[in-house]
Amino acid sequence: MNTKIGKRIKIERIKRDLTQEQLAFEANLNRTTISSIERGVKSPTVDTLEAIAKVFGITLQEMFNFDNL
């Protein structure tokens, strides 16, 4: 699951032409946290996912849509 979430976040970030640093700033997180999540090394909390989804302008439900991966 961590790998799928990480992949989804990376895809959404790139679609929006954001760097990891920019996403981290907008979501009030560390860049290393974003990197770890995208690589599937770190399991994000619901609060972290919610902050990232808010930056992307999508719902948590959409965050878990893995059809396009």
Image (tube, rainbow, N blue to C red):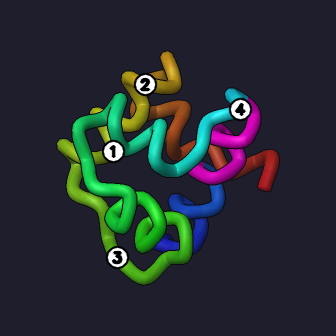
Question: Residue beneath label 3, please?
Answer: 42
Please provide the residue range marked out in magenta: 9-15
Name the amino acid, label 2.
Val
Name the amino acid, label 3.
Lys
Mark 4 lies on a secondary structure that is loop
Mark 1 lies on a secondary structure that is helix
Q: Residue at x 78, y 56 (%)?
A: 69
Name the amino acid, label 4.
Asp
- Where residue 40 sits: x, y (%)? 49, 76
The circle drawn on residue 17 is 4
Instruction: Calculate the distance from the C-alpha at mark 4 to the C-alpha at mark 1.
Output: 19 Å
- Where residue 39 sits: x, y (%)? 55, 75
61 or 51: which is nearer to us? 51
In this rendering, the answer to whether 36 lies above or below 64 is: below
The reply, left or right, for residue 55 in relation to residue 67 is: left
Dots 3 and 2: beta carbons under 8 Å?
Answer: no
47 or 27: which is nearer to us? 27
Instruction: Calculate the distance from the C-alpha at mark 3 to the C-alpha at mark 2.
Output: 19 Å
Instruction: Calculate the distance from the C-alpha at mark 3 to the C-alpha at mark 1.
Output: 12 Å
Q: Sequence-wise, which precedes: disc 3 or disc 2?
A: 3
The circle drawn on residue 49 is 1
Question: Residue beneath label 2, please?
Answer: 55
